[in-house]
Image (spheres, helix red, strand yellow):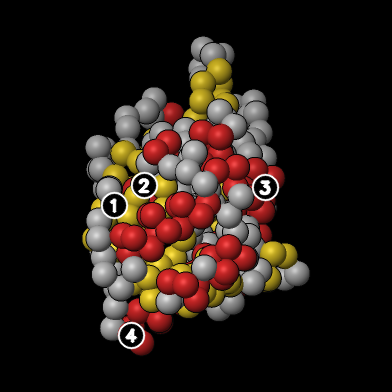
Amino acid sequence: MHILNELTYINKSSLALGYFDGVHMGHSVVLKNTISIAQNYNIPSVVITFGVHPNNILTNSRTEKILTFDERLEMLEKTGIDYVVVLNFEDYKNINAKDYLENIIVKYFHPKAITTGYNHYFGYNREGDGNLIKEMSSKYGYEYYSVPPYVTDGIIVSSSQIRNKLRLGDIQGANNLLGYNYFISGIVEEGEKIASKLGYPSANIQYNEEKVKVPYGVYYVLVEVGDEIYNGVYNYGIVKNKSGEEKFKSEVHIIDFNKNIYSKKIKISFITKIRNQISFENEEKLKYQIQRDIAFTEIYKYFLKKTCSFM
């Protein structure tokens, strides 16, 4: 996949327009249609997107991300898209929709086809939509495909729905809409080794501030270390150390794993929430609870391994 950070002429293409945060089940339909058309006409498939979420600039706020920028590119690459053009929204936010369509989309990419989601808007004040793209199609000789809402379990798949489910701790619900397990990744840092002294060493990583936060608690996760995937128990939230000080924790105990992975990157994929955070009177009770958490993962894995396509 080629990543372009500026407008580049691509003669004849199958385009997909959108931000694609999450690259979820609804997005996958848009992308598959884009790729299918490209293959039929033997032309490149191209995604045109923005580096920063438009809402962040238009509302001067911060939209938590399902995927970081790099993760979004990685997920797009997995779909088989040929090119991703990453534009700076600041440079285009004041262009009216018709000018954007004619002087950016048509001029630089000469599309054979354009595919968007049903709720795609563009141009100054979000004045452009699928109707305008369709209206201009005969003039510029491209086909337009508006992908209808993708519905699963009675829910229209959207990035906002996924964010809401993650914030509520409905991991399974969010994963069903994503089509894969929600994940975080980071470099393993050295911690206080409290869990190690109990016989359950943990790997500490930073929870990326840009990403959607799950509720504090303990989660059954899959941990990717290099090319291997392990079961794990992830603890996220505020805990007290021996001095009684409250400290933030983002740590995972990797089950049946004893390698030194300090300074290595790991990926933690969420399967389900095990429980809320609990305060323990002593280390013995903490140790007993960790044992129960590990047992939970074994039971959960046993009952779902044949039905969950993401495990």
User: Which numbered mark, 3 or 1, is in the foreground of this view?
Assistant: 1
Report the Cα–Cα distance between label 2 and label 1. 8 Å
Residue 101 lies, in percent from the top left, at 46, 58
Mark carried by residue 7: 1
Q: Residues within 10 Å of mark 2 (few under 14, many from 20)?
A: some
Element marked by disc 3:
helix
Q: Residues within 10 Å of mark 4 (few under 14, many from 20)?
A: few
- Report which residue position mark 4 lands on: 41
In the rendered image of this protein, does residue 57 appear above or below residue 99? above
The answer to whether any part of residue 135 appears in the image is: yes
The answer to whether any part of residue 175 appears in the image is: no
Pick the front one: 76 or 206 = 76
- Report which residue position mark 2 lands on: 87
- Which kind of residue does numbered mark 4 sit on? Tyr
Image quarter hosting the N terminus: bottom left
Of the two numbered discs 4 and 1 on the same chain, state the one appearing first in sequence: 1
